[in-house]
């Protein structure tokens, strides 16, 4: 071997020796940072682990972010020979590290080891470690440079350490042995049926007709129940109420509670015992249905006209709208509502003023006609320019037509003004006849009920447009004490000038009106003279007194 080769070999050995020394120095620095103490004087010096008052080692909960396999805490399942083998290492194989540490560092380490640690109960999931076990090594701070150097120095060992750490951190799941039943051979229904008892099949077959019969009985019971419900609902009047017309388009008829129903008993209690007793009486009898009053049949006839108009004009708004206008207290309203619903009256708007006069609300309700049993309130409404009348019931029962509204009017001071009445009262009948002949072509001034006659005539024309003149549900009558020959022409010409048609005109020339009205059987008869009202009442006619004109002033 040449001398140059020997020199090269020595140089390589010295280089490798220097590299090994540099690696040893790096490892020493790492071990110093991790706290490992290895003795070179024949035994290995280990820092004492911290223990609690019962002698158990306090295990630190290190973070799992440390990727170094050397810093991993030893698992419980590892053999204890690994820990004890470290104590039996020969002193010649290790290098002393104690000489490299300074005296101040040794004193601080001793003080830290001698300080008692606070008692901490052991974790329930892991058993306590004995004193001779190897203490866990605290994780060193994460350093990307050291991690990369270890990966480049020995990548296989670094990867195996990571895998071992992950495997050791997982606790093995206990394996459960599930019982395995041997698979059964599939059999057809005919083969399986042979294993069943024949008695069971017979029971099942005998049960089928019984269940079918029971099902048929239940169906029959259901059909009978629904048939009874259907008949019950057929007897009950229809709950579908037509929508009321808009007030601005409707013909509003305001009716008081005493005009619509017979409330004579309650009125007597109010006059004799006072308001409180009257209220108590009405509350105690709120479920007792009130009997019909003088305006009841008139209201029913108005509703029939509305029904006929809706048949011909489904979207018609020019209809009669009934408003119950009363000065009764609101607590009495329950009895009134019960009575209205009992008779099937289509009255949706109520005005209960609680003792206050309802006359102030008439214009707010756009009232065209006000009917009441109180003559004082009627007089107030006349003064306000609202057509009004005091209702009186007939002394006898009379059969009324249910399919046609029949309204009878007097002429002077009802449809017309009272100018002719002034002449008759002041100058006599002769002057009256001369005046009517002289002014035959001059129309009379309108009276308080002229507007209501116009409303009736407007509705009649709607039926005439559908070729229903002979079957029109509205019929009007003029029943006057005038003489046709001497003063009748001016009346008819006035109606013609107004554009109004009257179905029947009866000139009685001063004869009683009662017998004629019995033949007409009107639902309401308007007159300004009380002796005509009283005469018609005796025959059973429902009358309405209009307190207007010179006759009222003379009576007062």
Image: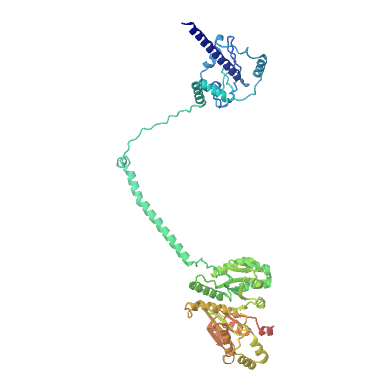
Residue at screen point 62% across, 92% down = 438
Where residue 393 appears, as percent x and y from the top left, is 59, 78
Q: Quadrant of the C terminus?
A: bottom right
Is 247 located above or below residue 90 in the figure? below
Where residue 492 appears, as percent x and y from the top left, is 56, 87
Where residue 363 appears, as percent x and y from the top left, is 64, 72
Q: How many numbered marks does the figure carry?
A: 0
Is 439 located above or below residue 464 in the figure? below
Question: Is residue 548 in view?
Answer: yes
Question: Is residue 75 in view?
Answer: no
Frontmost residue, 29 versus 540? 29
Frontmost residue, 219 versus 15? 15
Is 199 located above or below residue 335 in the figure? above
Where residue 306 appears, as percent x and y from the top left, is 52, 73
Quarter-of-image position of residue 330? bottom right
Q: Is residue 252 left or right of residue 192?
A: right
Task: Identify the residue at the far right of this view.
Answer: 556
Quarter-of-image position of residue 180? top left
Residue at screen point 33% across, 45% down = 201
Q: Is residue 517 left or right of residue 280?
A: left
């Amino acid at each position: 071997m040449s001398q140059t080769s020997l020199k090269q070999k020595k140089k390589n050995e010295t280089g490798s020796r220097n590299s090994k020394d540099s690696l040893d120095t790096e490892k020493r620095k790492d071990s110093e940072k991790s706290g490992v103490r290895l003795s070179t004087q024949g035994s290995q010096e280990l820092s004492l682990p911290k223990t609690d008052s019962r002698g158990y080692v306090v295990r630190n909960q290190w973070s799992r972010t440390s990727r170094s396999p050397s810093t991993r805490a030893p698992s419980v399942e590892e053999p204890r020979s690994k820990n004890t083998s470290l104590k039996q290492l020969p002193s010649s194989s290790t290098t002393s590290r104690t000489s490299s540490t300074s005296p101040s560092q040794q004193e601080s380490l001793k003080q830290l080891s001698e300080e008692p640690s606070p008692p901490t109960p052991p974790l329930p999931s892991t058993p306590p470690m004995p004193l001779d076990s190897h203490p866990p090594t605290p994780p060193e701070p994460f350093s990307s440079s050291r991690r990369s150097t270890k990966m480049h120095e020995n990548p296989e060992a670094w990867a195996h350490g990571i895998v071992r750490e992950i495997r050791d951190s997982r606790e093995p799941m206990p394996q459960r042995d599930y019982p395995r039943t041997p698979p059964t051979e599939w059999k057809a229904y005919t083969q399986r049926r042979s294993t069943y008892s024949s008695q069971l099949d017979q029971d099942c077959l005998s049960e089928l007709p019984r269940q079918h019969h029971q099902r048929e009985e239940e169906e029959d019971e259901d059909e009978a129940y629904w048939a009874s419900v259907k008949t019950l609902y057929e007897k009950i009047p229809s709950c579908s109420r037509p929508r009321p017309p808009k007030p601005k388009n409707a013909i509003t008829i305001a009716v008081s509670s005493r005009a619509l129903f017979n409330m004579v008993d309650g009125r007597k209690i109010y006059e004799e015992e006072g308001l409180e007793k009257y209220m108590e009486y009405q509350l105690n009898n709120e479920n007792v249905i009130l009997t019909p009053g003088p305006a009841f049949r008139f209201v029913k006839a108005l509703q029939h006209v509305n029904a006929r108009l809706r048949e011909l004009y489904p979207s018609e708004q020019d209809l009669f709208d009934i408003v119950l206008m009363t000065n009764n207290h609101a607590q009495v309203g329950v009895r009134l509502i019960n009575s209205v619903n009992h008779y099937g009256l289509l009255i949706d708007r109520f005005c209960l003023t609680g003792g206050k006069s309802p006359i102030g609300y008439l214009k707010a309700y756009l009232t065209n006609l006000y009917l009441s049993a109180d003559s004082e309130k009627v007089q107030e409404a006349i003064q306000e320019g609202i057509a009004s009348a005091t209702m009186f019931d007939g002394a006898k029962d009379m059969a009324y037509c249910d399919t046609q509204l029949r309204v009878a009017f007097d002429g002077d001071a009802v449809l017309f003004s009272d100018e002719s009445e002034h002449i008759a009262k002041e100058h006599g009948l002769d002057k009256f006849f001369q005046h009517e002949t002289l002014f035959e072509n001059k129309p009379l001034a309108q009276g308080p009920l002229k507007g209501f006659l116009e409303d009736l005539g407007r509705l009649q024309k709607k039926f005439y447009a559908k070729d229903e003149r002979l079957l029109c549900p509205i019929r009007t009558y003029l029943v006057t004490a005038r003489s046709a020959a001497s003063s009748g022409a001016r009346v008819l010409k006035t109606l013609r000038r107004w554009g109004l048609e009257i179905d029947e005109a009866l000139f009685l020339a001063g004869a009683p009106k009662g017998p004629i009205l019995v033949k007409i059987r009107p639902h309401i008869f308007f007159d300004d003279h009380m002796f005509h009202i009283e005469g018609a009442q005796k025959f059973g006619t429902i009358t309405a007194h209009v307190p207007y004109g010179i006759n009222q002033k003379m009576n007062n």
